[in-house]
Image (cartoon, helix red, strand yellow):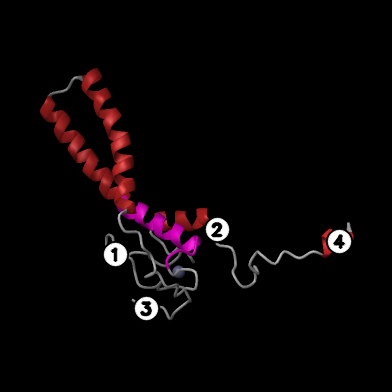
Amino acid sequence: MAYFVAMKDTTSPDPALSPERQVRPAMLRGWRRKCPSCGAGPLMRSYLKVRGSCAVCGQELHHHRADDGPAYLTILIVGHLMAPLLLWASVSLQPDPLILAVSFSVGCVALSLFLLPRLKGAIVGLQWAKRMHGFADASLSAPAE
Ligand SMILES: [Zn+2]
């Protein structure tokens, strides 16, 4: 029994050197378009532009590589919500086709514009929590912007 207690796991990193980053809170902070590290500073400097670093805690944010991920997820979610809804509305309600087309076009655009920056923030939060793309050794720089 004492043999097992004395064994030390040398494969896992020292938690003091690399503190665990929680994925869920980081993604929720990103969804709210806040810094995934502190949750206080704004993540975006415009609709979809991510700040170079957090204005509150100084966390470098330019390491993110969200690329097409937010757009892909937006299309995936909006399509899976609107396609069955369009089928249901056209079969059950049988509205005028022009009204149906206009209402669903406006709905798709509005939902896409709502989801896109939030999903981008969530992906940046995920990348920060998983230490991807330079977030691994990202240091705290002086607050900028
Ligand atoms: Zn911050």
Residue position marked by numbered label 4 in the rendering: 3
Point out the tag, 4 or 2, that comes first from the N-terminus: 4
Q: Quadrant of the N terminus?
A: bottom right
Which quadrant of the figure shows ligand 1? bottom left
Three-letter code for the amino acid on which mark 4 is drawn? Tyr
Residue position marked by numbered label 3 in the rendering: 144
Q: Nearer the viewer, residue 68 or 49?
A: 68
Percent x, y of residue 125: 44, 59
Q: Is residue 30 left or right of residue 6?
A: left
Q: Which segment is the magenta one?
A: 116-133
Foreground mark, 4 or 1, reads 4
Point out the tag, 4 or 1, that comes first from the N-terminus: 4
Instruction: Name the residue located 49 percent from the left edge and 69 percent from the top edge.
Output: 136
Residue position marked by numbered label 1 in the rendering: 49
Is 71 a magenta residue? no
Q: Is residue 55 above or below residue 34?
A: below
Q: Is residue 53 above or below residue 72?
A: below
Point out the tag, 2 or 3, that comes first from the N-terminus: 2
Point out the tag, 1 or 2, that comes first from the N-terminus: 2
Percent x, y of residue 26: 48, 58
Q: Report if the beta carbon of the residue with label 1 is closer than 8 angstroms to ligand 1.
A: no
Three-letter code for the amino acid on which mark 2 is drawn? Gln
Three-letter code for the amino acid on which mark 3 is drawn? Ala
Residue position marked by numbered label 2 in the rendering: 22
Three-letter code for the amino acid on which mark 1 is drawn? Lys
